[in-house]
Image (cartoon, helix red, strand yellow):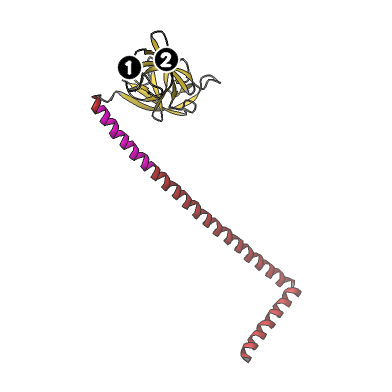
Amino acid sequence: MTRFYGRKLSFFLLLVIVGGLILYNPAIRTLFTAFSTTIQSLYFDTKHSVEEAIEHHFFQSKTIERLRRREIGLEKELLGCRQDARKYYAIIEELGIRPDNNATFIPVPSLGYALLGNFQQIWLRRFERYDPSKNYGVVRNGFAIGIVVEQKGRPLMILAGDPSCNFAVYIGDNRAPGIAMGLDARHMVVKYIPEWMKLEIGDEVFTSGLDRIFPLGLPVGRVLSLEKMQGFKNAKIELFGDTLHPDYVWIVDKR
């Protein structure tokens, strides 16, 4: 016990001596202050590095989790596409329809509006094998949304909401033929439908391929209303595709 208390007394006296030297000796006080500042800086730098490492780790973990969820979503989409493909091939086999292998799909970026205020006419970059004498179909997200025509020697995309956009379609299970013409950004009107053909509200509209602009079967929209004309019917349809954000599209090249 005596030895223990002796050690504590010695340590206390040492602290008193060091404290006195620091208080009354400027050189030692400066040295001690510099040492303390260095230790403090080292502590804060180390703390900052550890915090950055932890934050980086959690960011990587969140990114990995987000990518994992995205991978699962894409896998589900792939399974759905495979299922739809099986249904498609079963249908064309049942109907005896031969697939159209003469259509090529070319990805093309949009360049800008041909006329400010008209969101339905957009210049396209000249694409491979572009022929100014031909009209081309425009597809986005699997839906027919417009055509490409020549203007001033350049490819001009006219979207389905423009009155000058028109292409051949079928309506419903009876495949009633007609010509779809632009109405506004969300709608078209299908004209020249034979009056005697039966149609229903909600019937789906798809490309017929008879104008050699689109292949057969690309979805266009669904019927909202029907109007009888002299010898024909008109059908107002709601478009499936988005005609307001065509920053990147697929051009259909029918050979």
Instruction: Return the x and y of residue 217 as percentages of the image width and height.
Output: 33, 24
Query: Mark 1: which secondary structure?
Result: loop
Residue 166 visible from this viewpoint:
yes
Residue placed under numbered mark 1 in the picture: 210
Magenta residues (range):
74-92
At label 1, counting other C-alpha atoms closer than 10 Å, the crowd grade (few under 14, some 14-19, many 20 or more) is some
Residue position for label 2: 234
Residue 147 location, quadrant: top left
Marked residue nearer the N-terminal end (2 or 1): 1
Is 33 on the left-hand or right-hand side of 118? right
Looking at the image, can residue 153 be seen?
Answer: no
- Corner quadrant of residue 179: top left
Q: Where is residue 232 in the image (x, y as percent from the top left)?
A: 39, 11
Q: Is residue 209 left or right of residue 46?
A: left
In the depicted view, which residue is nearer to us: 25 or 36?
Answer: 36
Q: Which of marks 2 and 1 is in front?
A: 2
Q: Nearer the viewer, residue 4 or 218?
A: 218
